[in-house]
Amino acid sequence: MDFPGSFSNIKFYLLGAYPNGPVGGLLLNIVLAILAIAFSFLVGALLGYSRLSCRKYIKVPSVLYIEIVRATPLIMLIFWFYFFLPYVLGKNISVFWSAVIALSIYAAAYEAEIFRAGILAVPRGQMEAALTSGMTRYQAMKFIVFPQALKIMVPSLVSFFVSLFKDTSVTFIIGVIELTQTGIIVSQRQPDKMYASYLCVAIGYFIVCFSMSHLARMLEKKIGVFDLESYRPDACRDEYMLMPTHRKIPDEKVPAAGCYPPGL
Amino acid sequence: MIKFINASKWFNNHHVLKNINLEISKGEVVVICGPSGAGKSTLLRTINRLERIDDGEIVVDSKYLSDPKTNLTTLRAEIGMVFQHFNLYPHKTALKNITLAPCKVRGLTRKQARERALKLLERVGLLHRQDAFPSQLSGGEQQRVAIARSLAMEPKVMLFDEPTSALDPELITDVLDVMISLAKEGMTMVVVTHEIGFAQKVADRVVFMDAGEVLEVGCPPDIFINPQHERTREFMSKVFHIPIFTKPQEEGE
Amino acid sequence: MIITGIKITILLMAITSVTSLLLGTVVAIMRISRIKILRALGTIYVEIFRNIPGLFWVIFFYFIFPEILPFGWGARLNAYPNYPVVAGVMGLTVDNASYVSDILRSGRLAIPHGQREAAISSGLNRVQQYIYVLLPQMFRATLPPLGTRMVHNFKNTSLCMAITAPELTWATQQIESLTFRGIEATTMATLFYVGLAGVMASIIIILEKVLRIDIAKSAYQTRG
């Protein structure tokens, strides 16, 4: 194994052909992950929020979106946007952007779940206290519930970032020249240094993921863990909707089950 | 001020409030007591509609709660509420906890809100703790900040939902002192509590509830010493293992 | 081609679920054992495999693994026509096992101390303690996250297309490039993935209910 030979390519692994060409390598993985998180954040928040609604026409679409995207392999999503987006738009779209879009769509579903769990982790009493002091739902959400939920979400968001970062490696399939692709290209050019090039790829991923997941663990210790799995998917809180439901009092004495609290 | 007319509530098949009829007038201090699971807290929470009733009517400050035209937000601003578990906002200091609602709801300037908050903190004896976060305060201190937070909205009614039952016995007196001084100023108060001593001292009327029903309403000595209802008698004999009530009310209302 | 794809995908999922569960259990036991070296080895395993993408491991086992095997084993493997599937199984297994072991370890921490003590005092030896008392409870306590992991693992089988294992995703891409009827194939494949993931999720929910009743009847109810 001739490591020095392969390490002369180190710039390729880190930056790709950057100064003379497009960004690539490890940096591209990071860029992809950050862009996807940034683009999906708002959509994810909205989805997670509407999943808490008691009103079917708001809840059902978001549940469908989240569950379908979470049940589809990322590769499938990437293919969808790579092959069929140009078909729909009628014009070509660069490999990079179709990867970013697919990753954002993918990330939004997961972020929605993180967001929902974050809101549910804020004790109910907080919302009640805010409402009793005369705040509107919007104010209570903005000043009381959301800041606390955000803090609770931070460790999960960081660990999700790690997982998304790893998932960006999948984009090599449509020819994004990120770290894995770089490794494969270099190893094909220099078959005698195959081990070294794969080792470089592994080290690259490892360093970023290792430090990020330790950051996540540190934050968890500081902020406290909360467990996504312990929240039942049918949990629903009307009180978190900005517009109260003006339902008529039902004729029968038993209020509709499944919605808690019934009314407010 | 507050009027329940045949109010009923169900949790699924569980009838938690059964035809409640009760009227609380301005300036009155009403203590609700009874065994746990009797629906005391639920009754209290229906007043500012944290829980909604399924049948009957509640009128607060001559506004019907079931009326869609009633603005719940503005109504709630007139009703202060103190919770069993304080529910202070953990990400804000004691002072910020108090000033938040006056700024955002009443539209006070920061300075006005701050002045008001400091006055209230002084009143509950916590001026020196104004910059502490809730996690740095003891239970009794937290509850006093919570009371100050409600008072900052200058409410017409104060609701207390078992304000002392999550506190260590030695911290209870501080909280009760604040509540007693409030009662003496003529605040309308509805208090769910097991503190018989408090009820003895300041309550105008005591409501005894069991299994979602109001069984008895009367002035404290009548309910505590001389209950009419079988169930009330049973409960009181359990509460007072030792008959401590040798003398009736000390100092009027 | 689609049918073969589905078959291979299900095969991959079934094999890797079992193997990763086994490997994950072994690593989890290593990580909670008293022997320092085993603990360290387990931790190193998890850190390495969790912090490098699964895709890398799949590719690694396809390209590199045969090269580093001694005595011409590698050449024999390369000659094996189904080697992509085998490499896929190995790659997915090591990746998934790291997650499984992490989940199981957290399950061990959730078991009350008294369980172990009760097992010891009723005279079970170390191995018996694990088999009869600790492991069953670890699996039960961690069923929801384990289930999610298995669904994840099922989705990850699509990574094997990168090494030309003829599974479903690979098949759709072949159809796309051969007949240009990619939309139909991809739609079908997506529906299949979503459907099977849904089925898996509901099986897990049922399993969870069944096992939870079991637990409620036993030790935990009396803890007060």
Image (cartoon, coloured by chain):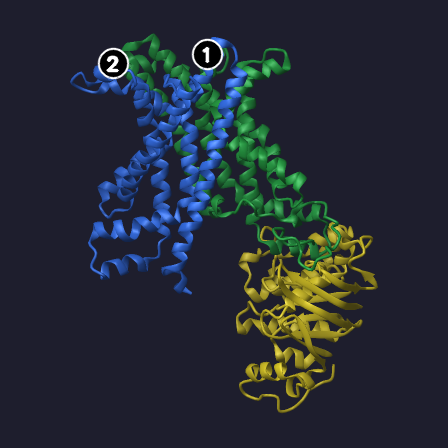
Chain colours: A green, B yellow, C blue
Q: Residue at x 62, y 91 (%)?
A: B246
Q: Residues within 10 Å of mark 2 (few under 14, many from 20)?
A: few
Q: Is residue C177 left or right of residue B222?
A: left
Quickly name the residue at label 2: C79
Q: Is residue C65 above or below residue C176?
A: below
Instruction: Single out the residue that lies furthest toward the front.
Output: C3
Q: Is residue C187 visible?
A: yes
Q: For the residues marked 1 and 2, what is the alpha-carbon distance in whole angstroms?
A: 36 Å
Q: Is residue A52 above or below residue B88?
A: above
Task: Look at the image and tell me in which quarter the C terminus of chain A lies.
Answer: bottom right
Identify the chain of the residue marked 1, using the numbered disc in the image. Answer: A
The picture places residue B212, in percent across and down from the top left corner, at: 65, 70
Name the residue nearer the viewer: B142 or A142: A142
| Residue type at the position of mark 1 | Ala
Q: Residues within 10 Å of mark 1 (few under 14, many from 20)?
A: some
| Residue type at the position of mark 2 | Ala
Quickly name the residue at label 1: A17
Name the residue nearer the viewer: A246 or C34: A246
Identify the chain of the residue marked 2, using the numbered disc in the image. Answer: C
Q: Residue at x 66, y 48 (%)?
A: A238
